[in-house]
Image: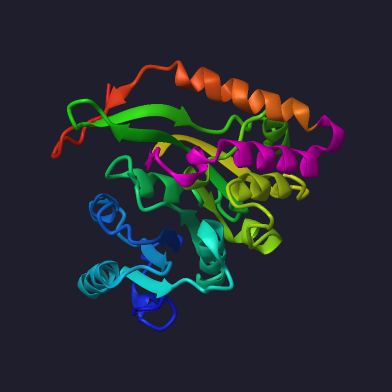
Amino acid sequence: MRSFSAAGVGAVSDGPGTGLTLIVPTLDSHPLLPRLVTSLQRQSWPHWRVLFVDGPSGPEHRTWLEALCHRDRRFAWEPQDPALPGIFGAMNQGFRAVPADHWLLFWGSDDWAAGATVLEDVIAATRPPLAGGTPPDLVVCRGRYAGAGPDGAVRLGRPTGFCGQPSYRLGLFLGSTPPHQATLIGPGARRHLDHYAEPFRLSADLDYFLRLGAVPGLRARTLPLELVHMGSAGASGQQTRRRLEEVRLAYWRAFGLFWWFPFSLRYVRRLWSRLLPVRYAPRAGHRGPIS
């Protein structure tokens, strides 16, 4: 095992600018990981780090992780603490393991970078807009769900983003939510809130962003950048009833008797996004935009 704190990952230079760590929960998911790994290794900004928080996986998966971490010291892994179960438990373990001055990005095993320059672009957005100014607490980008098309090519489906202008909290009330796979959580946000809450198993990310919305003066910067492509076969999509119950609870905790308004608009937005045209990812070796 190469743990984040003990494996020497801290010796990897962040280079100029800000440290960025990606937290990736895993569970016997090594067949999915090469696309994520390759998309990061091709980045024009090479100073990222990855921490895999691994559930009770089998030996084949852990051997794969060990080999990757040995080849590229920007990757590290540690076993998931049984006291922190589930995907959001693994994410909370990542919150604790990563240096307080790092930006955090949470991806799944079936997510990957949308282009070779996206981390360079998003890291530039973490810096203060003016010299001597204050950096944002969140940088919210866009993502797009993906699946396999009929010919085996990657089919890019529903986009997801956040309409948070002119106010982060107003955007939340209007049913828009930062996609956690496309949102960099900065040191400022972590000082206010450094964990996902119980009893949420599927929508703890929504609850987290809603609780941040109650922080006075929170600085959220939105960036019109498609940062990540996301696998669309996650567990949350298979447990619709529980997800709806958790979403309702999150909005109730944030907005009380008015919970129904952002709840309804959330799904109106989802329905509208499903009507947008489907795209196909470029073949290997193609670096241009998808038209």
At a point 34% along the width and 79% down the height, the residue shown is 2
Res 174 visible: no
Question: Residue lying furthest bottom in this view?
Answer: 6
**Is 39 situated above or below 263?**
below
Question: Residue lying furthest right in this view?
Answer: 257
The colour scheme used here is rainbow
At a point 29% along the width and 29% down the height, the residue shown is 155
Residue 159 located left or right of residue 218? left
Q: Nearer the viewer, residue 211 or 45?
A: 211
At a point 64% along the width and 62% down the height, the residue shown is 194
**Is 89 situated above or below 246?**
below
Question: Residue lying furthest left in this view?
Answer: 285
Q: Is residue 150 magenta?
A: no
Quarter of the image with the N terminus is bottom left
Q: Is residue 230 magenta?
A: yes
Picture coordinates of residue 225 (x, y %)? 42, 35
Query: Magenta part mainly helix, strand or loop?
Result: helix
Picture coordinates of residue 123 (x, y %)? 43, 51
Q: Which region is colored magenta? A: 229-258
At a point 36% along the width and 53% down the height, the residue shown is 109
Residue 114 located left or right of residue 286? right
Q: Nearer the viewer, residue 246 or 51?
A: 246
